[in-house]
Amino acid sequence: MPPRMTDSAPERRDDDHQRPDPETDADRSSGRGQGQAGPGTDAGADAGRGGGPSAEAGDGLRPDPAGGAEGGTGGELDTDPVPGAAGTGRADSPGVEARAANGAGTGPDAESAPGTHDRPRAGNESAAEGEPDGHGGSGPRPENDADIDVDVDERVVAMRRAADGGRRWRAVHLSGCAALLAVALTGGAVAFGGVGGGGRAGAGTEAVSAAGALAPGVLARGDLDAGIGSLQKHLRAQPRDFGSWATLGTAYVEQARTNGDPSRYPQAERALKRSLELDPGNDQALAGRAALAAARHDFTGALKDADRALKQNPYNERALCTRIDALVELGRYEDADEAARTADGRRPGVPVFTRYAYVKELRGDVRTARDVLERALAAADSPADIAYVATALGQLAWNQGEYETALGHYARALAADEDYLPALEGRARAQAASGERAAAVEGLEQVVARFPLPGPLVALGELYEDRGADGDRAKAGDQYALVDAWTSLARAGGVNADLDSAMAAADHGDKKEALRAARAEWNRRHSVHTADALAWALHVNGRDDEALPYARRATATGYRNAAFLYHRGVIERATGNDREAREHLKAALGLNPGFSPLGAREARTALKDLEGTR
């Protein structure tokens, strides 16, 4: 998969096909009133990758269905319209780990961005009574304005630090971050009504879920703004519709991922809470809460909620997919493989196929990963799915140093969706590795101007450093400062950004902070990405003997990642293991000689020095 900044692969929408289980969501809520929005469908976005063509259960890509993990996702969506921020219905990657989260986010790409890691948090009026509040939603402001002010101060300080220097060209980038920050400061209430307060809204009325409240196709097509607008209108009239509250909550999760705006996460949390208050234990809301936890990089919580959802509905696609993501991010790769097989047996389709491929890649089986993705691409029938799967193939090819192949896949993705950011970022990385530096810089500048996320910010900064023209060092510093600003914003939204912070800070920031963050993340989960991040953070702090076991662990699954091999080789050299150092530095450059503008150059220098001392 792509170069990731976190441990999860990019998140994607769930597909829109009928559940194979005999009992639909409408059946389950019929005793409470009308059926739920999009009965029996999975319209919306999942916490992982993909939303693809319908397929019958048992018609998946694996040769041999096996049992293991529990099942899929329900009919939820992932975003909410905000003035000036349009949702796309897709997640960005690797990643997520960016993915996505993804994050949200996904495999060790969930451990990174295009791939990246993350996660995220608000009144009292009933949804039926809420009116537009003038700050990107409707409903009351958060209950505790004093708490918000504290967060505002911290985030403003972070943004001012990032803006230090005041160059006009950088102001464009910072204004984008400031816009996200402004949303975060005012995004405390669900778009058209508060979630909480004392007691259940409309007490004395049965919880209902209205059939037809939102056409599943609207969400499946990725028109999230239109979908959320429909949900808002419907919930004003039917505030007891637990299914639509669940759909709204997952829609906010999707919007946060696609727009790089973690301020949506608190809104998602409140909407999902409302759904569970109306119908405790409903699988839609539990699956949405699992997706939210994964997007915030709380993978233990995500696994718990996914399992709870699957007890209610073993065919819930979002829960099936989030369960795979969580196991991957926790470093439980055998369990993730089993979960992917189970999901393939229950809900075959693009969301499951892409996760299945990623699990195979993490375990060193690149051939199977490529085969699964190619078959998924052949089955994809919407521009969104074509763009997503083609990008995943491009990222896989890039990771193997196959730059022309990668560029071909990215071209196909962009033919389907010319604005698909993961494909734009991946193309720029492949161009840089192919020697097309000017095109790569231009491409990444366009990406970060729209969404200043850690992965592309660091990549652009390193390209500036490598180019070395007048002013490039300052430009690079500006990109790294924006990573700090993004980290502050993400944490304000409840996202655990320690992995992103550790990876960026180790090479381009506070080395002690990198080690603190890497240790904190390792204490939460033992994935290959967290092992690599801790190894490198220990190395840059001069603690190579401690770093070596983690560097070895990061490469132990067979995952073919040139950056991991480079890190291991450098650490082995520092500990006097010259033979092993030569082996792994050669392997890194042989696998993907353009894995990083600065890292590849340093790997060549280190290898040359080692060869000279033989």
Image: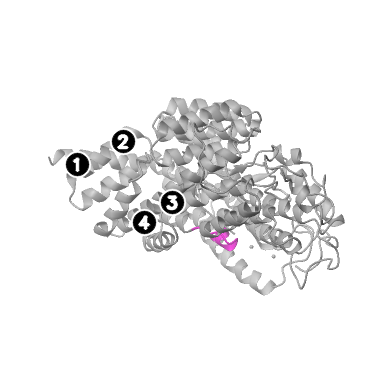
> Closer to the observer: label 3 or label 1?
3
Identify the residue at horizontal 51%, vertical 56% (top origin).
165
The residue that mark 3 highlights is 332
Cα separation between marks 4 and 1 = 26 Å
> Closer to the observer: label 3 or label 2?
3
Cα separation between marks 2 and 1 = 15 Å
The residue that mark 4 highlights is 534
x then y, percent, for residue 286: 65, 56
Residue 491 part of the magenta-drawn span:
yes
The answer to whether residue 61 is left or right of residue 470 is right
Please determine whether, in this image, residue 476 is positioned above or below residue 276: above
Please determine whether, in this image, residue 410 is positioned above or below residue 174: above
Q: Label 2 sits on what residue type?
A: Leu
The residue that mark 2 highlights is 589
Q: Label 1 sits on what residue type?
A: Asp
Q: Can residue 81 be seen in this view?
A: yes
> Closer to the observer: label 2 or label 1?
2
x then y, percent, for residue 362: 42, 42
**Mark positioned earlier in the residue sequence (3 or 1):** 3
Cα separation between marks 3 and 4 = 18 Å
